[in-house]
Amino acid sequence: MKLTFSPASPFARKVRIAAIELGLIDKIEFVPVTLAPGQPNDEYSRINPVKKLPALITDNGEVVVDSYVIVEYLDDLAGGGKLIPASGALRWKVKSDHSLLQGVLDSMLLCRYEKMVRPEPLRWQAWADDHWNRAWNGMAHFENQTEMLSRPLDVAQIALTCVLGYADFRFADCGWRKAYPKLDAFHEKMLTRPSVKISLPPPA
């Protein structure tokens, strides 16, 4: 299998953590891809027409896109029910938690693009503030989710780890640790896992 990725992508990091935790990391070849808003990449667009990372190319040449779907695919390869509960109420809780966190990451990425990529005369501050508020409120939501922070490892916890890691990477002065001490404790605990340490983004 091949995985397209960027070391800075929190979505690709999610898949890398999952692959390590599922014991599948040695079966995946990692293919670095550079993508930037406003810059075409026709070669990669043939793999993923919407030009998003990551994408998994299976051994038979099929392409699996979206970080959650890739984790679900890997979880199935590993026997199922490892990082995504196979059934019951917890399955839907984990999937819903993950969807919220996917939205948090989407908003953080849009804030990053607005601040660092869009030409300054074209920046829309109210739009960026709205997306940052979505991300901040998302973190506040999980600060109060004691059960989520303490249950056995799942894809939603991996996604939360990637949210917090991306906050450190791109928004180092945002103050999330002071605002959300339970998330800080959760993140410190997750950093004891080799999969989380190995996949940290490079220094900004």
Image (spheres, helix red, strand yellow):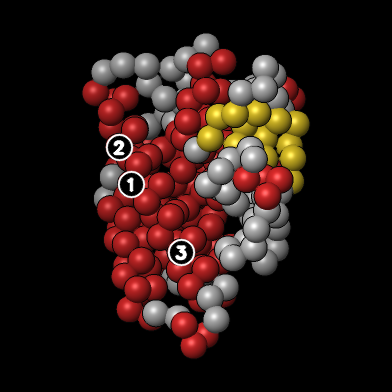
- Give the mark nearest the N terminus, 3 or 2: 2
Image-based side of 49 in relation to 160, left or right: right
Vertical comparison of 146 with 41: above or below? above
Q: Nearer the viewer, residue 132 or 162?
A: 132
Helix, strand, or loop for circle 2? helix
- Residue 42 in percent (x, y) is at 68, 50
Residue 22 visible, this orientation: yes
Q: Residues within 10 Å of mark 2 (few under 14, many from 20)?
A: few
User: Mark 3 sits on what residue?
Assistant: 110
Dot 3 amino acid type: Leu
Left or right, 157 with reference to 38:
left
Label 1, label 3: how far apart the Cα atoms are: 16 Å
Circle 1: element type: helix
Dividing the picture into quadrants, the one containing residue 36 is bottom right
Residue that carries the numbered disc 2 in the rendered image: 96
Residue 107 image point, x, y percent: 40, 60
* Residue mark closest to the camera, 1 vs 3: 3
Residue 153 lies, in percent from the top left, at 46, 31
Furthest toward the bottom, the residue is 121
Q: Which circle marks residue 100 in the picture?
A: 1
- Amino acid tagged 1: Leu
Q: Quadrant of the N terminus?
A: top right
Residue 26 place in picture, x, y as percent: 74, 25
